[in-house]
Amino acid sequence: MKKLIQRNISLLQQIPVVTRYITILCLIVFPIQLLSFDFSNYIALHSIHDIAFFIWQPLTCTFAHVDPFHLMYNVLYFILFGYFVEKQIGTTWYLLLISSSILGSFICVQYNWVTGNPIIGLSSVVYGVNVFVLFVKTRNNVILATIKLLAFVFLLSQLKDCNININATDASHIGGCIGAALFSIIYFSCRAVKKG
């Protein structure tokens, strides 16, 4: 049993720091949500016009999830693509990418708020990380090309039925993509200037 625990801790330590701690936060927040509806209400993203809105919600809603499947789906995709991206661009740039996805999601959701239901989930960040992967040059690297193809298939399968004007969740996903796309353009422009 001790070896099994040590192996799992060792595996967790191989995940880059931001991806690891966001994953751990999601896994800690979920059971607390199950115990208290009020807690969920405080951390879920509400409309800025709603009395239930608090300034921390654009960030905290990222760690909350509806059910175990929603949590596992988001966390698995986040680890899969976040591991690759954080290793590629480093912790600081990765935090900026995540922040851009969250900000894009927040703006898009607030602009298109059409439902009274609050927004929760890591998915706008997952979508943003996937968009960043599409900007990465593969340079004849089979693993990189495979990850890029997986990101493309994921985004295509998830966004094909989105309607930004009807569904706040879709607005959140699309906003995460837009925020990450803008970040990616800035990031790769800065790298090109630095090289040039």
Image: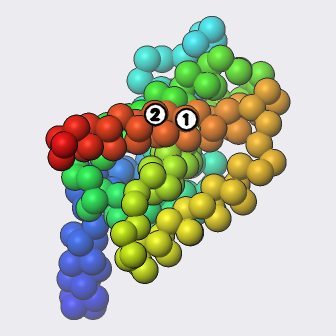
Residue 38 appears in the rendering: no
Residue type highlighted by circle 2: Leu
Q: Residue at x 24, y 85 (%)?
A: 7
Label 1: few (<14), some (14–19) or many (≥20) C-alpha neighbours in 10 Å = many
User: Residue 146 placed where, x, y %?
Assistant: 50, 75
Q: Is residue 166 left or right of residue 131?
A: right
User: Residue 184 placed where, x, y %?
Assistant: 40, 42
**Quarter of the image containing the N terminus?**
bottom left
> Looking at the image, do the residues carrying marks 1 and 2 touch, with CB atoms under 8 Å apart?
yes
User: Residue 124 placed where, x, y %?
Assistant: 54, 43
Q: Residue at x 63, y 55 (%)?
A: 155
How many numbered circles are shown?
2
Q: Secondary structure at mark 2?
A: helix
Hey, which quadrant is residue 100 in on the image?
top left
User: Residue 180 placed where, x, y %?
Assistant: 46, 40
Q: Is residue 159 left or right of residue 53?
A: right
Q: Secondary structure at mark 1?
A: helix
| Front one among 25 and 177 | 177
Q: Which residue is mark 2?
A: 182
Q: Which residue is mark 1?
A: 178
**Quarter of the image containing the C terminus?**
top left
Q: Is residue 37 left or right of residue 115?
A: left
Residue 1 appears in the rendering: yes
Q: Residue at x 62, y 19 (%)?
A: 110
| Front one among 194 and 16 | 194
Disc ID at residue 166: none
